[in-house]
Image (spheres, rainbow, N blue to C red):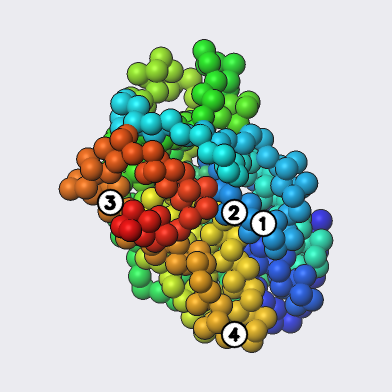
């Protein structure tokens, strides 16, 4: 799987998650040599709910990186039903007739994407970190200096590449935490995706089964909630359901509340995925945006650095994330939260709209546009 011959001044991609692997796959598939470097050895785990929206499935299938049968093989569970809660009050259970939300294992999913990039001809270096970034070269943990023609920062939330080109820091804390509980330890399997609002500001607790285990996690983006508040809320949620937290490992990772980089970097240095701040501020979704932005960066590079056409694509992930930054106030602000909860409880169309958004069927603007008509 691993090709690791490095040509002179290559296109260098730092990070082999969904953003970096998709970028490398697209470049290599177009016959453009590139090198991807990741500090981890694959397969590796990534703290994540592993939920793929219908929008993400469409991006994966239509690009050709994952044909339908391969996406099917990676899918552990499909969910069409969601229950929405305001703390312990059930607001509504909603079943969609449309495309499902799929649950995948990040270990398998990310390993498949990076294998695809290698098979397409990208050179892959794993188990080696980039430790410093200069304007035309990087230094790795093995002491190598690699000069580049273009650099892609797909190195996740704490992106070193982003720090090298931007003074913009995160606003507030974004944090995701999760327990994975074997189904055999539970009295019954939750059949639907559960979303519980109201436990802490600007976030929610989720319950998602992948048919073998149940992921019970909590996340907040751009939130004034401290990680300790989220841990407290999550452990209280579990204990109230008779699940002893002490038995299970708590895993956590930051969720970018970095300011969105609408230009995906600058000059010959590009950013994709979490490194660009491309996470939905309502749902916390980031896998699909990582894949899509990886492709967008590959398109910018292969068009000789012409960002304009690529960045202005209608309804691209940048536009969706920008909308989510605006609309999260309706759902999470102390002034409108009560109205939003009542809307979800009393009006089926709100629940349908919320499902349309998390399953990627509608943009925020389209949904709120319908309500204003
Ligand atoms: C608890 C939690 C639950 C989530 N659940 C969901 C979900 O259900 N659905 C969803 O769509 N999104 C979810 N997300 C968000 C999603 O995980 C991210 O948005 C997504 O992983 C971003 O992909 P990426 O490729 O940009 O970054 P990553 O997946 O983080 O990949 C970055 C890669 O860069 C490598 N790297 C980092 N620094 C260096 C360096 N210096 N040198 C070399 N390599 C480096 C890392 O090893 C890693 O492999 C969740 C996040 C959290 C924290």
Mark 4–mark 2 distance (CA, rounded to whole Å): 25 Å
Instruction: Find numbered disc 3 in the image and state the secondary structure of the residue it sits on.
Output: helix
Q: Are marks 4 and 3 in contact (CB under 8 Å)?
A: no
> How dense is the environment of label 4, judged by Cα within 10 Å: few (below 14), some, or many (20 and up)?
some
- Say if residue 57 shows up in the picture: yes
Q: Which residue is mark 4?
A: 305
Q: Position of residue 309 (x, y in %)?
A: 55, 82
Q: Where does label 2 land, which residue?
A: 56
Q: Is residue 126 left or right of residue 96?
A: right
Query: Is tag 4's residue or tag 1's residue first in the polypeptide sequence?
Result: 1
Report which quarter residue 149 is drawn in. Answer: bottom right
Residue at x 53% of width, y 59% of height: 289
- N-terminal of the pair, mark 3 or mark 2, is 2
Q: Earlier in the sequence, mark 4 or mark 3?
A: 4
Determine if residue 176 is in view.
no
x, y percentage for residue 199? 29, 34
Disc 4 versus disc 2: nearer the observer: 2
Please tell me which of labels 1 and 3 falls first in the chain: 1
237 up-or-down from 64: above or below: above
Q: Are marks 1 and 2 in contact (CB under 8 Å)?
A: yes
The answer for how far apart the CA atoms under marks 1 and 2 are is 6 Å
Q: Is residue 92 left or right of residue 63?
A: left
Mark 2 crowdedness (10 Å alpha carbons): few <14, some 14-19, many ≥20: many
Q: Which residue is disc 3 drawn over?
A: 330
Q: Residue at x 63, y 68 (%)?
A: 295
Is disc 2's CB within 8 Å of ligand 1?
yes
Mark drawn on residue 290: none
Q: Residue at x 43, y 71 (%)?
A: 261
């Amino acid at each position: 799987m691993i090709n690791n011959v490095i040509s002179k001044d290559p296109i260098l991609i730092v990070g082999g998650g969904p953003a970096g692997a998709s970028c490398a796959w697209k470049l290599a598939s177009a016959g453009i040599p590139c090198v991807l470097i990741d500090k981890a050895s694959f397969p590796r785990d990534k703290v994540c709910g592993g939920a793929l929206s219908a929008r993400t499935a469409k991006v994966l299938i239509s690009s050709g990186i994952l044909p339908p049968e391969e996406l099917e093989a990676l899918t552990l569970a499909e969910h069409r039903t969601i229950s929405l809660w305001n703390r312990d009050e059930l607001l509504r259970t909603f079943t969609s007739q449309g495309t499902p939300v799929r649950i995948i294992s990040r270990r398998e999913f990310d390993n498949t994407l990076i294998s695809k990039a290698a098979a397409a001809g990208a050179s892959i270096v794993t188990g080696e970190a980039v430790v410093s970034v200069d304007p035309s070269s990087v230094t790795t943990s093995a002491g190598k200096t690699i000069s580049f023609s273009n650099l892609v920062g797909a190195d996740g939330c704490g992106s070193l590449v982003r720090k090298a080109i931007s003074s913009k820091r995160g606003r507030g804390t974004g944090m995701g935490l999760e327990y994975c509980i074997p189904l055999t330890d539970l009295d019954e399997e939750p059949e639907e995706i559960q979303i519980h609002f109201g436990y802490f500001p600007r976030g929610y607790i989720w319950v998602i089964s992948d048919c073998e285990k149940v992921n019970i996690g909590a996340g907040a983006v751009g939130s004034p909630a401290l990680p300790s508040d989220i841990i407290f809320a999550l452990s209280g949620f579990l204990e109230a359901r008779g699940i002893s937290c002490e038995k299970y490992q708590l895993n956590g990772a930051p969720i970018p509340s970095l300011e969105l980089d609408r230009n995906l970097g600058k000059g010959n240095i590009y950013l994709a995925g979490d490194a660009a701040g491309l996470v939905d501020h309502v749902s916390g979704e980031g896998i699909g945006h990582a894949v899509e932005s990886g492709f967008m960066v590959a398109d910018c590079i292969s068009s000789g650095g012409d960002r304009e056409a690529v960045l202005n694509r209608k309804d691209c992930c940048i536009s969706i994330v920008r909308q989510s930054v605006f609309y999260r106030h309706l759902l999470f602000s102390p002034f409108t939260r009560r109205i939003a909860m009542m809307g979800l409880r009393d009006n089926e169309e709100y629940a349908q709209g919320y499902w349309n958004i998390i399953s990627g069927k509608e943009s925020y603007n389209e949904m709120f546009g319908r309500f204003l008509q």
